[in-house]
Image (cartoon, helix red, strand yellow):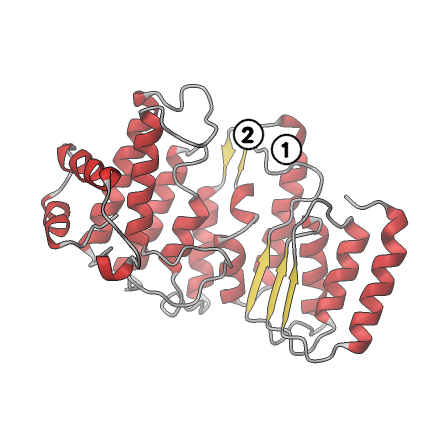
Amino acid sequence: MLPARCDAAVRRWCDIASRRLRHVRVVYVQEGRNTFNPVQTKLVVDCAASFPSVQDFDMNAGEAVSTCMSVAANLRAGRFSNLRRLEINCGGDMSILRRKHSSTFNARRIAKFAFDELIALLPPDLGIDCMVHALYPKLIEIGDEDTWDLWASTFFDCVAKGADVRSRSILRELEAMHEWPYDDVSQKRMDVYYRTVETLLTVHRVDPNARGRTCGRFISDRPVLWMMLDSVAGTVCRLEGDSDFDISPNEDDPAVLEPVFRFLMRTIDLLVRHGARSTLADLPGYEPDDLDVKLRRWILARPDCTQRMREAMHRGDMCF
């Protein structure tokens, strides 16, 4: 985190930018080796809010609590009125992403509280932006605690208030948020994810193949069904000890991974049931390889492989 002696330099830069730049529409504060301290973070957010036409604000290099509080203060003051996209992905220097480290528990709770206050103030679509991408979803679990039920309740409150989940690729955003299976996945998290997707498909009639707006800059343009198949492949590789990712002890244990497999298979069946596809036309440059053949055989051999999934695979709707 940049020390206080840098405050004056950041203040001067923000003052110059605010005075000289009037038609800025995108503010992207890139993540790097250093991040801004709380005072500097407030200066940067206030600078972004000074641009009346700003529509896209992406804050990576800053302190999370200060970012949320500063954005909220500017919203109350009538600024950020044209904002159409918001991403807050800054963790500061408190290692608040380490959810099982007791030394971070209070910092995580404070950051989550600041996000909750901001989400309640934001327009519903921007609230969804914060909820499904970047830092906030990583704060839901603190040690052995989790608040995924509360997350789902807040998410559907935003939908009820008018968030447009049909014009955006909401299912792809949700899948990217959960990062299956490359972090420690709790049963509550899997249950809430499944119920959320099921409600979006059955009640809100979202298109599982939608390719509309997404809140994250780096969300894959692959279909959500492909992303779930990719998670199956990654979990199979982990089970067989052929993963490029660092894994915790016992994460390659079949007994530990079986609930993840059951969840993935159940979710794939849900998506296929509602018309989700991952076809050759959806995958530019796709060439079937040994992993593709292996994955097909593995899925077909599972006792929870449904007839719908078999038919989709034979139609070419489950290409990976």
Residue annotated with mark 2: 143
Q: Which picture quadrant has residue 80?
A: bottom right
Position of 173 with respect to 69 (left or right) is: left
Residue drawn 72% across the image and 62% down it: 45
Residue drawn 80% across the image and 54% down it: 40
Specify the quadrant that holds the N terminus: top right
Position of 163 with respect to 195 (left or right) is: right
| Disc 1 and disc 2 in contact, CB within 8 angstroms | yes
Q: Amino acid at mark 1?
A: Phe
Position of 179 with respect to 239 (left or right) is: right
Q: Position of residue 227 (x, y in %)?
A: 33, 48
At mark 2, the secondary structure is loop
At mark 1, the secondary structure is helix
> Pointer 2: residues within 10 angstroms few (<14), some, or many (20+)?
few
Distance, label 1 to label 2, CA atoms, is 7 Å
Q: As rendered, which of 107 and 88 lies closer to the eye?
A: 88
Residue drawn 30% across the image and 31% down it: 236
Q: As rendered, which of 155 and 45 lies closer to the eye?
A: 45
User: Tag on residue 105?
Assistant: 1
Q: Which picture quadrant has residue 101?
A: top right
Q: Which picture quadrant has residue 290?
A: top left
Q: Earlier in the sequence, mark 1 or mark 2?
A: 1
Q: Position of residue 187 (x, y in %)?
A: 37, 33
Q: As rendered, which of 146 and 40 lies closer to the eye?
A: 40
Q: Amino acid at mark 2?
A: Gly
Residue drawn 21% across the image and 57% down it: 274
Position of 313 with respect to 217 (left or right) is: left
Q: Position of residue 181 (x, y in %)?
A: 39, 37
